[in-house]
Image (cartoon, helix red, strand yellow):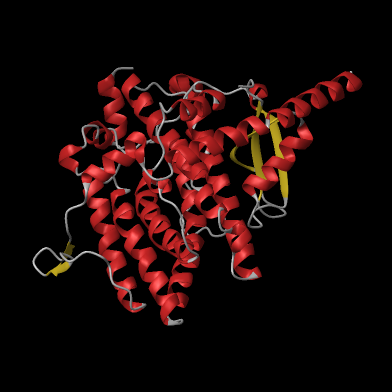
Amino acid sequence: MTEEKFQIRIDKEEKIEPKDWMPEGYRKHLIRQISQHAHSEIIGMQPEGNWISRAPSLRAKMILLAKVQDEAGHGLYLYSACETLGISRQELVSQLHSGKAKYSSIFNYPTLSWADMGAIGWLVDGAAIVNQVSLQRTSFGPYARGMVKICKEESFHQRQGYEIMAQMAKGTSEQKAMAQDALNRFWWPSIMMFGPNDSDSPRTGNAMKWKIKRKTNDELRQEFIDKTVNQAEIIGLTIPDKDLKWNEQRQHYDFGEMDWDEFWNVVNGNGPCNKQRLNHHKKAHDDGQWVREAAKSYAQKQELIAN
Amino acid sequence: MSENRTVWEVFIQSKNGLAHKHVGNVHAEDKIMALENARELYTRRNEGSCIWVVKSKDIISSESEDAEAFFDPSNDKMYRHPTFYTMPKGSKHI
């Protein structure tokens, strides 16, 4: 099989399966993208896990627990998809720990108030959904199937977040102020989740040609903003962007310039929580070592008994 | 860093009477753990009435590159399909 034949399959919208021939660049791009996606789900458990013990009601606590468990599940679906490309789970985790593999920068921001649970569900999961809906059509079969499953579960996440924001925005003036503050802090990091502008995104070309990505960063970002403005208006909160304005001619919202210095700063490890997030993951992994060893020796013992 | 655990493929029967369908895989040391991990990972929303787990290494797959040759024998037997046959005009329920 040659790269041309491969491209013909891609252009015919055929799905590529793990055992099919694929260019090395395609495999590499997928491993990087899927593992980054998986790590984001796993690290994303931390900012929300932070509020499980302090949720304001039993209902809120049960929902948050279920949501964090879903994030773990999403991480595992994605690790599974990534492993079909010939990389082991162990290698993926060690790439996360060494810093070779990244995760979404959004999770390097702290969650300071309960309203942040609302903002994360509404905005962060909302942005993730826009991206993931388009990835349901990605050309690599296991990734596409994982996305279908994740998208089904993800809309509960966004709705629970928006419900929290709506409730707080309707509450006392302090509660409304908390909701607005959470929106202020999470708005820009959320729209930066879509990555650099297309003009500064060197890998977009191949990813689009191979149909790994189906829409560019800027297209997805615009889609998210167009959807979200009205939701903010309905609950009486103000999006912190003075340049945000409906453009009749484009039939889209215009919006302000993102602070790319901050973006790259956080990507490169200098966000408010980068160290904390990674250290916590390493610690949890190390603390689980004895469990893995015990499970292994138990399994070996059972096998001996059986034979 | 510890070595990798065994990978198990997971098949779920979504409703009594339907076939089991592949949904993904889990890592586990033994079959009980594999079943329990599969339940936690793939049936958090009542997706299943029965789960099968099978060690990935025990699955034998045909090669997708050889698909054409492998499935070729069935291509020239159109007479296996009901549409191959000409029915007399006016005949019904056949």
Residue A170, percent from left and from top: 43, 81
From the viewer's side, name the closer residue of A66 and A34: A66
Asked whether, in this view, residue A4 is left or right of residue A15, the answer is: left
Residue lying farthest to the left in this orientation: A249
Reply above or below: A207 against A24: below
Identified at 81% across, 21% down, the residue is A300
* Count of marks placed on residues: 0
Reply above or below: B65 against A74: above
* Quadrant in the rendering for residue A28: top left
Residue B69, percent from left and from top: 46, 19
Identified at 76% across, 25% down, the residue is A296
Q: Is residue A140 visible?
A: no
Residue A143, percent from left and from top: 44, 38
The quadrant of the rendering that contains the N terminus of chain B is top right
* Quadrant in the rendering for residue A23: top left
Identified at 48% across, 34% down, the residue is B78
The quadrant of the rendering that contains the C terminus of chain B is bottom right
Q: Is residue A99 visible?
A: yes
* Quadrant in the rendering for residue B68: top left
Identified at 27% across, 28% down, the residue is A7
Reply above or below: A91 against A198: above
Residue A263, percent from left and from top: 28, 44
From the viewer's side, name the closer residue of A150 and A139: A150
From the viewer's side, name the closer residue of A90 and A48: A48
